[in-house]
Amino acid sequence: MKMWFGETTRGSGMVFTMVYVEDAPADVTLTVSNATSDGSPLPCGVYPFDRFGGYVLNVPVLQVPQAVRVVARDGAGSVLAEAAKTVDPRVAKVLSRFNTARRNPVALAIRNSNRLVRAESTTVKVMNVIKGVHGDSLIHGSVSRVSSSANGVGGSMRFDVLGPAGTPVQLDPWTVLSDDSVEDPDHPGIVQRTVQFSVPIPASERSIVLWARGGDGDETGGFLALQPHMLEGMREAWRGLTLSADRDPRYEDWFLEHHRASARELEVQRVRVFNETPVFSIVVPLFRTPLDYFHEMVESVLAQTYPRFELILVNASPEDGALSAAVASYVADDDRIKEVRLDGNRGITLNTNEGIRAATGDFVAFFDHDDVLEPDILYSYAEAVNAHPDTDLLYCDEDKLVEGHYRNPFFKPDWSPDLLLGFNYVTHMLTVRRSILEELGELPGHEFDGAQDYNMTFLASERARNIFHARKVLYHWRVHPGSTAASSGAKSYTSVAGVRALQGHLDRTGIAGTAQAHARSNDYYVDYRFDEEPLVSIVIPNMDMVDVLSACIDSIREKTIYSNYEIVVVENNSCERATFDYYDRLAEDPRVRVVTVDTGGKFNFSKVVNHGFSEARGDYLLMLNNDTAVIEGGWLTTMMGVCQRPEVGVVGAKLLFPDKTIQHAGVGIDRGGPDHLGRDLPGNTTDYYNIYDTPHNLSAVTGACLLTKRDVFEKVGGLDESFASDYNDVDYCMKVRDAGYLVTYDARAVLFHYESLSRDVGGNTRRLLLHYRERGRLIQRWPAYWAVGDPYLSPSFRPGTLYRNLG
């Protein structure tokens, strides 16, 4: 038998070489090995290529020579022939160009032939190259083994990431996120094992080779080479996909071209006649205001298309002759402008109070002396009052004005009281019905300086019948040295005042908790207190998967600080002896019970949970997936603190993949359907104003970790069992919201969730039909979320986004 190397070409980060054999017996097999000059193993592969009666050898494109050896053996293992060669990167490049230029048919045929389906193979794929928790690059991908038998895909697996010199570059060993083996529905008899993985590499790496191989000494396996343009392209694609609106450099152009009211729209607004014509008293405290800022501020008010307003200028720096003269000029020119002259600066809160006392309008709007309004802000507010006459508080979206340019938009959610507990997201332009302010009696004191608008939002919202959010950027917050907008640390006293404002709200509303300042300036959180701990029933559906279930329960028992809980495992069609042996061991713990549900042999998650809740003893019910694990002991304490508030019906947690990227940070709903927000972002991301690290209200959270009250659960009829597989948790959250309760994402409760990266429901026609049938039922039941939009996600976000991207 003879064996020799033939044509060479390159493609997709690999070198392909034809291997010819002559006089080979029918039972011949080829094996291949590859190494660096110092003997370190390198990835390689060899497979039959019947078109030219030979085999194809493939190795990665590296910057160093590779020593390749191919051995042919008969069925008894005897060596029939062998051939060796050095794959030099420069030579391979020249040969590839030569064969391509000549259009060599063999070279053209074998290029990228590794993509052809083969009965026995290992394939490496990359899904995303994302930013990791520590600023590195995190590779999310999969390794698929295909074989004609289950034994052929089993066993341990090694995984390495090599740099251009063939040396390892991964920062840590790979993390296995999921490991599943299934029979290929399109190829009966073929078993496919898919291992989803995560592995960190330095962000500076320009090209890599991902290499999966058997743990039994098999050095071939499968590999994928990512050249610089491919790796950087995937990084850029991820950056573009996850670029939140507040960081998007395209914002100013988008705002001017697509968002701001056109001249035609403004003309229409000026002639519109409203049934209700409220007067807005715009209070502006002045103190050493630069004249150019002052003129821009006043002119933006005078440009309003809705004319019924009074502008109250509270002059706290009368010694500034130029400013006082400018104020006097405007007062003389327009009788809607009034001056309240103080004898000196009393602080922002007391200065503002004088403006409130001078106000005569139906609403009082709070406006900073160096900021700018869009000409349709009062029109938008008047329109809201006409549509919702019981409106007592209004606010709008905003951005920052930096040296004449619009930056950092904040597209706010509709009213989110939990977000307000974390920071003053309302801010501008806070507008309150004057009768609400009169109900306060005594106006706030100077101790709220720096957080006076935060305190006022709490005071007004506690009394407001309806709160309206104008879903449009109508306010420009000027950034200049020393302004609060320029730096969260520019006025450190604001954090102290903010804690005072938050604590006052907690005390007035009966929330048992202590206001705390976050490490981030002007962000806050609540440490909830308990006079007693109500019983929480943690209900865990389970079918076999003993190792997974035991890890979940062990993490609860070992780490949870909250002491008054029970665990109810709902047995659902298990068949393995080990499962029931484990149940027997669980019976030794008085806090753990196993109950059985009869689903007729069919999977119905809703029925399983409903049965578990019916068997539970607690007044608070937590549905928890068996593939979760507690990370920090305070998770249940903080969730219960939120859930005990009477207005809250559901609380969900922040769930992380094992590599500490986000699996779930709440559920958003738009025309693309419900999906997990922030998916695959680093768990410590600060994207979009730290929203993923701040508790806030949403339309839904995942049932993988969902806490609710028993009386709320019973009031809305529990989980709808017609949603057997998908969307039962989303439907439940919508029912709870429809009953008047809040759904809260609690970012302080963090657990691992060992769900696979891919949520694909394809490959199984029956499963796919069920998925779309249940999705259709959800749309039919809750059409407003698709027609009008999610109240907690701005229409200015791009449809289908998980990352609050610019529309």
Image: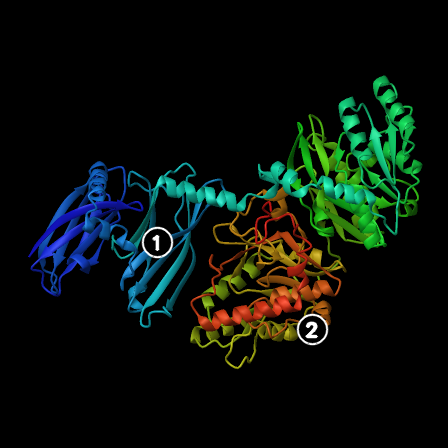
Residue at 56% x, 78% y: name it. 597
The quadrant of the rendering that contains the N terminus is bottom left
Amino acid at pointer 2: Gly
Amino acid at pointer 1: Val
Q: Nearer the viewer, residue 203 or 185?
A: 185
- Do labels 2 and 1 touch, CB within 8 Å? no
Return the residue at label 2: 717
Position of 691 compared to 427: left or right? left
SS at mark 1? strand
The disc, 2 or 1, on the residue closer to the chain's N-terminal end is 1
Residue at 69% x, 66% y: name it. 735
SS at mark 2? loop
Residue 17 is situated, as x and y percent measured from the top left of the image, at 19, 48
Return the residue at label 1: 124
Assess disc 1: are there few (<14), some (14-19) or many (≥20) residues with their C-alpha within 10 Å of its C-alpha. many
Q: Nearer the viewer, residue 570 or 727?
A: 727
Q: Is residue 765 above or below residue 504?
A: below
Position of 83 compared to 807: left or right? left
Measured in 3D between alpha carbons, the distance from the residue under mark 2 to the one under mark 1, in whole angstroms, is 46 Å
**Which numbered marker is on residue 597?**
none
Image quarter of residue 97: top left
Residue 535 is situated, as x and y percent measured from the top left of the image, at 68, 65
Position of 260 compared to 203: left or right? right
Residue 316 is situated, as x and y percent measured from the top left of the image, at 86, 26
